[in-house]
Image (cartoon, rainbow, N blue to C red):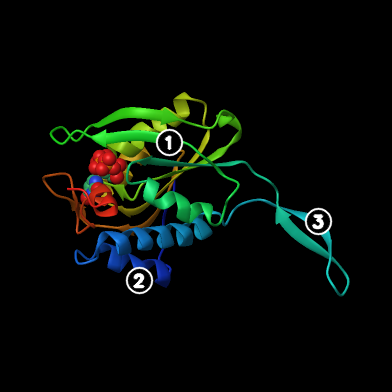
């Protein structure tokens, strides 16, 4: 069964508070999402394999470590997931970036896929699927379906705010996928918004409504 990790690092929690605040404007919201994505990328890459190398310091030879060159892919769920990509790339700049475009039908809350483009060597990469919100879980489950259908095997899902309904949906449909979140909120409201959440992530990132 996939595990759920809640990143309780004080910097992540502090910045998330301002992301939630309805008085935070678009520019600051975007900067904070970018910063939290970097901090979450630091935590999520904790298990990257290392290999030994020899290096010469100004003083002597040293046995040192380097990343073993695992191929990574970052896949934002459009559009709000895009707000997290640059923050992750700051730490893992060699990762390739795919895109899955989905939106929730406002009536049924079911995801509608409109775009998919992944790196060509999809079978060889480990993927981090990113979206700020995990609400009903419909979008994440569908995006994971899309990645797996194209050959992805190793997938992690990372988001800022989740609720129990979304976590359960991923666990049921994709028990192999670990979930990494900054906060697990209380519930969904009747409109499918996370309570207390942060509102509509896409609208707050891009200033639309
Ligand atoms: C939001 C969010 C997720 C989805 C989560 O996107 O960014 O992708 O809702 O909801 P779910 O777990 O119930 O599927 P939205 O559909 O609003 O599209 P947008 O990013 O284009 O605004
Ligand atoms: N999508 C959002 O952007 N916010 C929510 O609370 C739920 C889905």
Residue 182: x and y, percent?
A: 37, 59
Gap between marks 1 and 2 measured at Cα: 29 Å
Q: Residues within 10 Å of mark 1 (few under 14, many from 20)?
A: many
165 relative to 12 in the view: left or right = left
Residue 87: x and y, percent?
A: 46, 56
Tag 1 or tag 3, which sits nearer the N-term? 3
Residue 101 visible, this orientation: yes
Image quarter for ligand 1: top left
Tag 2 or tag 1, which sits nearer the N-term? 2
Which residue is the extreme one toward the top?
A: 149
Relative vertical location of residue 123 with respect to residue 37 in this rendering, above or below: above
Tag 3 or tag 2, which sits nearer the N-term? 2
Taking the spot 60% from the left edge, 47% from the top edge, the residue there is 94
Gap between marks 3 and 1 measured at Cα: 35 Å
Question: Which numbered dot is residue 68?
Answer: none
Q: Which residue is mark 3?
A: 53
Quadrant position of residue 144: top left
Question: Which numbered dot is residue 14?
Answer: 2
Taking the spot 59% from the left edge, 30% from the top edge, the residue there is 121
Residue 19: x and y, percent?
A: 29, 63
Q: Element type at marker 3? A: strand
Residue 137: x and y, percent?
A: 29, 40
Q: Which residue is mark 1?
A: 99
Quadrant position of residue 60: bottom right
Taking the spot 52% from the left edge, 60% from the top edge, the residue there is 42
Residue 173 visible, this orientation: no
């Amino acid at each position: 069964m996939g595990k759920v990790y809640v990143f309780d690092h004080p910097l992540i929690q502090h910045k998330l508070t301002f992301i939630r605040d309805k008085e935070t404007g678009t520019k600051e919201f975007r900067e904070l999402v970018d910063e939290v994505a970097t901090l979450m990328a630091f935590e999520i890459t904790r298990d990257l394999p290392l290999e030994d190398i020899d290096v010469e310091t100004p003083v002597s030879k040293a046995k040192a470590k380097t990343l073993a060159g695992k191929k990574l892919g970052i896949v934002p769920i459009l559009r709000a997931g895009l707000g997290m990509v640059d923050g992750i790339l700051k730490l893992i700049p060699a990762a390739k970036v795919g895109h899955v475009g989905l939106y929730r039908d406002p009536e049924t809350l079911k995801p509608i896929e409109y775009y998919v483009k992944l790196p060509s060597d999809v079978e060889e990469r480990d993927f981090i699927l990113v979206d700020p919100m995990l609400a009903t879980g419909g979008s994440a489950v569908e995006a994971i379906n899309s990645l797996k259908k194209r050959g992805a095997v190793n997938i992690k899902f990372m988001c800022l705010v989740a609720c129990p309904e979304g976590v359960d949906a991923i666990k049921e449909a994709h028990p192999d996928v670990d979930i990494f979140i900054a906060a697990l909120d209380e519930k969904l409201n009747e409109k499918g918004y996370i309570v207390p959440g942060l509102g509509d992530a896409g609208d707050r990132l891009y200033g639309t409504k």
